[in-house]
Amino acid sequence: MKKIIFMLVAGLLLSGCVTQKPPLSDDQYTAFATLLTGIHKCVVTGYVTPEVGARAQSYAEGNLNTYQFNFEVLKSRVSRVADTVNPSQGDCNTLAMQVAQRKNQIDANNEQVAREAQTWKDLSDSQNQNKTTYCNKIGTQTICNSY
């Protein structure tokens, strides 16, 4: 009996550690389909560069991958909304601005991480720089200590 209770408690604790992605709702399928179609049409019409479009698609797919979704359902939804999505130059400019903002945030975060890593490296190097090493030979063994 104690084994069964222990196994149930252990199972509950372990299952609590697993984080599952939330499922994509019907409205979210439509929203992602509209976004991906709009990005494609902004590039095709020349309103944004292929580089901006690729970055926008990458960000959208990154957001999409935080959900559980059925690719076939999404593909079907893209086909359904394709004729109704016609972004204007202004829509595509807004998209390009949002992509630039996100890229700037990511770049700033990466710079901060690099600065912090360099600070830790500099600190580590400075601590190792002023050490004195003493070596003693006992028989055929040499033992060195750094202080």
Image: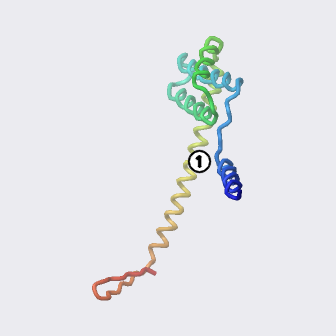
Q: Quadrant of residue 68?
A: top right
Question: In the image, is residue 34 above or below residue 11?
Answer: above
Q: Which residue is found at the position 47% from the left and 68% from the top? A: 125
User: Callout 1 environment at 10 Å: few (<14), some (14 to 19), or many (20+)?
Assistant: few
Q: Which residue is mark 1?
A: 109
> Where is residue 51 drawn, in percent x and y?
50, 29
Q: Which residue is found at the position 68% from the left and 48% from the top? A: 16
> Where is residue 109 drawn, in percent x and y?
59, 47
Question: In the image, is residue 97 above or below residue 147?
Answer: above
> Where is residue 126 drawn, in percent x and y?
48, 71
> Where is residue 67 drawn, in percent x and y?
64, 34
Question: In the image, is residue 51 above or below residue 84?
Answer: below
Residue lying at the far top in this picture: please name it. Answer: 83
Residue lying at the far bottom in this picture: please name it. Answer: 138
Q: Nearer the viewer, residue 63 or 99?
A: 63
Q: Which residue is found at the position 50% from the left and 25% from the top? A: 50
Residue lying at the far front in this picture: please name it. Answer: 1
Q: Nearer the viewer, residue 118 or 142?
A: 142
Q: Which residue is found at the position 69% from the left and 26% from the top? A: 28
